[in-house]
Image: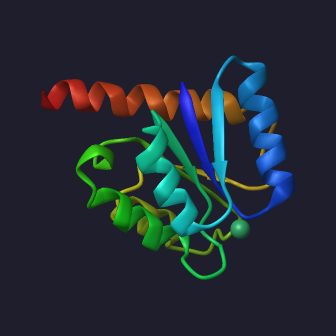
Amino acid sequence: MNILIIEDNEQNIYLERYLLEARGHHVSEARDGPAGIAAARAVAPELILLDIQMPGMDGYAVARMLRTLPTLDTVPIVVVTSYAMSGDRAKALLTGCDAYIEKPINPHTFVADVEAAGAGSRSKEQAIS
Ligand code: MN
């Protein structure tokens, strides 16, 4: 898959990119919300990994904006965050995200979780069309 990481933490970007590229995925990255939205419009990713806690524009705002863009209204968005307060998962799903992965990232399950989210959303799109 062509995957866009929107994340402000260098170590998380590095780990996610390493794990995904090791499994043959193509990765692009953005380090804040506005850059992430611009990158999403430019590269038309097949899946977006989205951090919630970012300075300026948080992940929820990014997800809401992405869902208003015609070319990005169905791309799978996977929230990746340590901000795991009660209700956070539900809020992520309400703001248009498709799946939720908690930090710290588990190297043994991360790629499978991402791939499952991508596969699930593709079948949802097929069901709609
Ligand atoms: Mn962050």
Q: Is residue 129 above or below residue 35?
A: above
Rendering quarter of residue 106: top right
User: Is residue 103 found left or right of 30 in the rendered image?
Assistant: right
Could you say where residue 59 lies in the image, as x and y percent from the top left?
53, 68
Could you say where residue 77 lies in the image, as x and y percent from the top left?
46, 48
Could you say where residue 52 lies in the image, as x and y percent from the top left?
59, 68
> Looking at the image, can residue 54 be seen?
yes
Q: Is residue 88 above or below residue 23?
A: below
Q: Is residue 58 above or below residue 16?
A: below
Check the picture and name the quadrant holding the C terminus.
top left
Rendering quarter of residue 32: bottom right
Residue at image point 57% right, 62% down: 35
User: Is residue 66 found left or right of 56 in the rendered image?
Assistant: left
User: Is residue 66 found left or right of 8 in the rendered image?
Assistant: left
Is 121 or 21 nearer to us in this picture?
21
User: Is residue 71 found left or right of 77 in the rendered image?
Assistant: left
Ligand 1: image quarter: bottom right
Q: Residue pushed farthest left? A: 129
Residue at image point 36% right, 67% down: 64
Residue at image point 36% right, 66% down: 65
Is 68 or 117 nearer to us in this picture?
68
Residue at image point 14% right, 32% down: 128
Q: Residue pushed farthest top? A: 24
